[in-house]
Image (cartoon, helix red, strand yellow):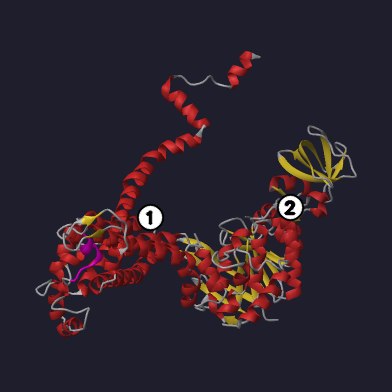
């Protein structure tokens, strides 16, 4: 009997690795815990910890005369500062820009993502991924400075408009209030173009992934049941792609909310939230106000995700 | 009478692949018509041409006399039950079923009323508020059916609708589909690779192979008088006899088919041929045995009232030579 049993059940494996892997097979939860421990520690301590520290800072206030941060009591005074017109301006400007960039990215990204998801296969799909990701391999600063040159009054865009005899159109655009300016490189329009360009891959990829998951038979079915192409789009394709678009918009919206380099290099000299944070925690030495400013994008993103969830954007996931 | 759907010398080529090659079929109004064939034989392409998802490379398709070349699916009074059901995951059952009515901007109250009626027709009354993901395969299929018939199309297309269901449910659905078709009077065109399903459900059927129609006829025609070896083989259950064997027993060199139930068991040397029983399968109402006679395998169905021989037994096989069906076409 014992010899028969030995041929069925092999003896326990020898050595540290052998016995460890046998142990992990019996206790898969321990293995999962070990695999996730380093990132969880990082996320928990380094990231969430710093976030809490930041949050705490925002409840202190700076003494207006001495310029010293008063850490003896918690106060909402700094948040009150945010509501002063010049600070509220910064917040509204940043949120407005982020919203415009997100909407434009979604509109431009959708046809690209749709074509890739439905029509490209094999080698062409690989080329699509390469084409979308390639710009991410180049330095962000190089791209922004390149855009500054493209958009400048002496830049190539002006030259193109001139040669097409469309300078009047460009000038008409630049003479518009708020979004216009002396040249594209020092206008909100320029900032907007560069934001859209730089964050575009983050919108295309999730949208494409969502569209790829829509079975072609659903689109056939819509058409079969009488939906014109436009009705198919709004009733079937768009709702099913929405989780992907929302995922992309989380990237474009939050990246724009937090960026402080692009508006510094291309655009007007008006502050965005990121620039305000940078200057308050640096030269101005007003850490509480910088912290309060940093909390704004977090709160906005929280509200945004909550609204998206309520609108059923994640129902099809 | 004007056909419900007519294919006149229709071809559909994908590059060098001839998915459909010069087929002509006429389907009568109110008919339950099956397209039967192995996978890749062109039957689904045929269905997609009627629905309008594909356009023919050559030939003409008419639906109730109207040419449909270049007419998109949404302008055809033809609805489809898809193989994967294609229910919209972001809508509940009632919204799925009422989708065609919503597109035509019917008032909500009427949509809800008609969706509930259509659901009742497929025995799913009261399921309107559920999501497709909460339903079983059989229920999803019924929802797809309700959605396809709610606007009373002229022609209903069903693409392997029973393929994903288990046996018991499949048999039940076969009966229900037949009953529904009779109640609605809509022309049903049904794609299947299951010969039993095609024979039991269809009024008439077309057998496809490699993009061509091999035979069109009633189930009885196809079963009793297959025109070619392929049809006899694919429709199955019938014995396909090679010319050499047929020459020996009937004095004529041709492929022939012989139905299993036409063969009677006899003592050795008491029938037309002697055979050795190589397998036996108990089917309940009958026993199916396979016997080999001179290198030819013959299936025989023995009713439960008779004793079936064991494996390895020597038997005689008796049948009338009139039961041999000679096949003209050499396929």
Q: Residue at x 41, y 38 (%)?
A: A35
Residue A228 vs A4, above or below: the answer is below
- Residues rendered magenta in the picture: A270-277
How packed is label 1: few (under 14 Cα within 10 Å), some, or many (20 or more)? few
Residue B44 vs B302, above or below: the answer is below
Q: Secondary structure at mark 1?
A: helix
Q: CA distance from mark 1 to mark 2?
A: 47 Å
How packed is label 2: few (under 14 Cα within 10 Å), some, or many (20 or more)? many
Image location of residue B28, percent across then percent down? 69, 75
In the rendering, which numbered label is found on residue B184?
none
In the rendering, which numbered label is found on residue B257?
2
Q: Main secondary structure of the magenta part?
A: helix
Residue underneath mark 1 = A122
Residue extending farthest right: B305
| Residue A305 image-quadrant placement | bottom left
Position of B321 with respect to A279 (left or right) is: right
- Depth check: give the residue in front, B199 or A155: A155
Q: Which quadrant would the N terminus of chain B be assigned to in this image? A: bottom right
Image location of residue B218, percent across then percent down? 74, 65
| Residue B272 image-quadrant placement | top right
Q: Residue at x 34, y 52 (%)?
A: A52
Image location of residue B22, percent across then percent down? 55, 68
Q: Residue at x 54, y 77 (%)?
A: B74
Q: Secondary structure at mark 2?
A: strand
């Amino acid at each position: 009997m014992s010899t028969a049993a030995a041929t069925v059940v092999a003896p326990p494996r020898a050595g540290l690795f052998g016995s460890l892997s046998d142990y992990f097979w019996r206790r898969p939860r321990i293995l999962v815990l070990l695999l996730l421990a380093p990132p969880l520690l990082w996320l928990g301590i380094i990231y969430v910890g710093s976030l809490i520290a930041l949050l705490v800072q925002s409840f202190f206030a700076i003494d207006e005369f001495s310029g010293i941060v008063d850490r003896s009591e918690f106060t909402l005074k700094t948040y009150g500062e945010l509501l002063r017109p010049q600070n509220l301006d910064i917040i509204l400007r940043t949120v407005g820009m982020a919203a415009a960039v997100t909407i434009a990215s979604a509109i431009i990204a959708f046809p690209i993502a749709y074509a890739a998801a439905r029509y490209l296969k094999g080698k062409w799909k690989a080329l699509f991924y390469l084409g979308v990701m390639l710009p991410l391999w180049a330095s962000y600063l190089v791209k922004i400075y390149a855009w500054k040159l493209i958009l400048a009054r002496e830049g190539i865009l002006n030259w193109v408009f001139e040669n097409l005899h469309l300078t009047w159109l460009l000038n008409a655009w630049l003479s518009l209030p708020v979004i216009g300016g002396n040249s594209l490189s020092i206008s909100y329009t320029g900032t907007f173009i560069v934001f859209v360009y730089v964050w575009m891959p983050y919108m295309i990829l999730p949208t494409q992934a969502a569209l790829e998951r829509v079975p072609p038979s659903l689109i056939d079915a819509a058409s079969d049941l009488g939906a014109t192409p436009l009705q198919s789009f709004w009733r079937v394709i768009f709702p099913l792609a929405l989780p992907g678009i929302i995922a992309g918009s989380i990237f474009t919206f939050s990246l724009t909310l937090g960026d402080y380099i692009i508006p510094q290099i291309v655009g007007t000299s008006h502050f965005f939230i990121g620039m305000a944070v940078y200057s308050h925690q640096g030269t101005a030495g007003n850490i509480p106000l910088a912290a309060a400013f940093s909390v704004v994008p977090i709160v906005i993103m929280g509200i945004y995700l909550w609204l998206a969830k309520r609108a059923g954007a994640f129902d099809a996931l | 009478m004007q056909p419900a759907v007519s294919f006149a010398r229709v071809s559909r080529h994908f590059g060098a692949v001839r998915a459909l090659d010069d087929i002509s079929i006429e389907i009568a109004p109110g008919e339950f018509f099956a397209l039967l064939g192995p996978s890749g034989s062109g039957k689904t392409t045929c269905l997609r041409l009627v629905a309008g998802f594909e356009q023919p490379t050559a030939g003409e398709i008419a639906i109730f006399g109207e040419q449909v070349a270049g007419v998109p699916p949404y302008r055809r009074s033809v609805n489809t039950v898809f193989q994967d059901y294609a229910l919209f995951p972001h809508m509940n059952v009632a919204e799925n079923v009422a989708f065609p009515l919503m597109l035509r901007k019917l008032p909500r109250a009427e949509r809800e009323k008609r969706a509930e009626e259509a659901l009742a027709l497929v025995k799913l009354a009261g399921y309107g508020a559920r999501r497709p993901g909460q339903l079983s395969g059989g229920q999803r299929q019924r929802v797809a059916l309700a959605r396809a018939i709610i606007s009373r199309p002229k022609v209903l297309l069903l693409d392997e609708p029973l393929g994903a269901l288990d046996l018991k449910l499949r048999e039940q659905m076969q009966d229900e589909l037949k009953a529904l078709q009779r109640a609605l009077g809509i022309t049903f065109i049904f794609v299947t690779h299951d010969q039993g399903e095609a024979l039991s459900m269809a009024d008439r059927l077309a057998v496809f192979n490699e993009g061509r129609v091999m035979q069109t006829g009633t189930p009885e025609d196809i079963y009793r008088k297959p025109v070619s070896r392929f049809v006899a083989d694919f429709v199955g259950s019938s014995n396909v006899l090679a010319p050499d064997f047929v020459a020996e027993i009937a004095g004529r060199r041709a492929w022939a088919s012989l139905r299993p139930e036409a063969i009677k068991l006899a003592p050795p040397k008491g029938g037309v041929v002697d055979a050795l029983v190589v397998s036996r399968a108990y089917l309940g109402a009958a026993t199916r045995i396979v016997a080999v006679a001179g290198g030819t395998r013959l299936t025989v169905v023995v009713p439960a009232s008779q004793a079936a021989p064991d494996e390895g037994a020597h038997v005689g096989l008796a049948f009338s030579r009139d039961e041999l069906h000679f096949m003209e076409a050499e396929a």
